[in-house]
Amino acid sequence: MIAFHYPPLQGGSGIQRTLGFTRHLAQSGWEPLVLTVSPGAHERIAADAAGAADRQSAENCCPVHRAFALDTGRHLAVGGRYPGLLALPDRWISWWLSAVPAGLRLIRRYRPHLIWSTYPIATAHLVALALHRASGLPWIADQRDPMLDTGYPEDARKRRLHAWIEHRTARHCAATVCTTPGAVRALGMRHPQAAHRIHLIGNGYDDTAFRAAELALPPPPGGRQPFTLLHSGVIYPSERDPAPLLQALARLQAQGVIDAASFRLILRASGHAQYLKLLIDRHPGLDRLVQLAPPLAYRDALQEMLAADGLLLLQAANCNDQIPAKLYEYLRARRPVLALTDAAGDTANALRLAGIDTIAPLDRADAIAAALCRFLTLAQQGAAPLAGAAAIASHARAARARDLAALFDTIHDQEPS
């Protein structure tokens, strides 16, 4: 299993997807073996006790081998600048030079039956392609996000290279796994000859982590507290732009519908705090309602979800074929969800299938203001829709690992003995 996103890296849903597979595959008869990067390649490393526990847990469940890698943007830049060719297809292309020999040694030592790699980062697929060509082992490519999309990648050279990698993946993979129905359709349309080998295995949540977070959940604070609406995770300006939401909040604040004593929006681990601060500062007094908060350890982040009065989901129409991985954690937290997304997209459809209809378009401040007022009323009355137990259970990481193991079984059974 070739994965860039793995402990001790801090943050990112990709970590939890790969961790979930490595922790649960053995229950279905598959023993994982992880090839990842050296810790220095990561920009953010979890250095606290919770991060150390996550790393130890990851290394206890299966063998983990780390191949040396540099981050071009941090390690090879001079005065903040570096040649673009050293960051194609991504800033960790140096990983390929060490990971391929390391992977060949692991193949000789462990005699694995399959190779699995996960994107992003694209270099992981290049490593897997080289190991597949050298060993003949079947290769499964995990596409957590589309490698190509409208206007993505913006850089023409990177787009051409992504197209080349995607073509080789479609040609050589025994199976490609996407995380949403829209991504399956889009990839199948680009590669119709490989459409029968494209499969859907969505993201999910770690029930063990949630149970641990629930056991350690502190008691709620006493006294009257403002209604807390939480967005937990990265806010991409081009894909989850909260500018209309902030306009709606400023409008409701000016009308006296909400104030700092009754409402608080927490944007946790946004990854773009400077950009968001500029948006907030456009509206005098809005900083009393909106808090930009730093990242938390994973268990602490889950506890914050469990304690929030409401959970906020953002997804623009240009990402209709994608579903934020946090959606499944939001469902498991069993807190009211306000989704600002296109009604025609996969995100809205997944919520409707779970019985949740508190949805409004991300790009219309008037619709957001109306939806927020309705949402606050429902949540405060205890009448906001929540997902049912069966819907929640279907998204557990253990269930997703069983789906992946079944795919592995099928591919392995098709191989000549």
Image: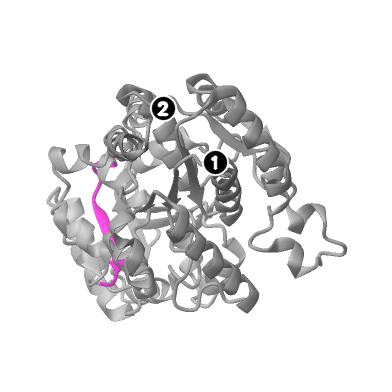
Q: Residue at x 76, y 62 (%)?
A: 86
Neighbor class of circle 2 (other Cα within 10 Å; few <14, some 14-19, many 20+) is some
Residue 262 shows up from this direction: no
In the depicted view, which residue is nearer to us: 108 or 242? Answer: 108
Q: Amino acid at mark 2?
A: Arg
Q: Percent from the top left, x then y, of residue 356?
A: 17, 56
Tag count: 2
Which of disc 1 and disc 2 is earlier in sequence? 1
**Residue 254 located within the stretch drawn in magenta:** no
Considering the numbered disc 2 on the image, is that residue within a helix, a strand or a loop?
Answer: helix
Residue 109 lies in what quarter of the image? top right
Q: Which residues are magenta?
A: 333-342
Q: Secondary structure at mark 1?
A: loop
Q: Which residue is mark 2?
A: 23
Could you tell me the amino acid type at mark 1? Ile
Query: Foreground residue, 96 or 399?
Result: 96
Whole-percent x, y for residue 400 in the image: 30, 39
Viewer-side label of 2, 1: 1
Name the side, left or right, on which 102 lies relative to 86: left
Which residue is labeled 1 in the image?
A: 2
- Residue 340 belongs to the span the image colors magenta: yes
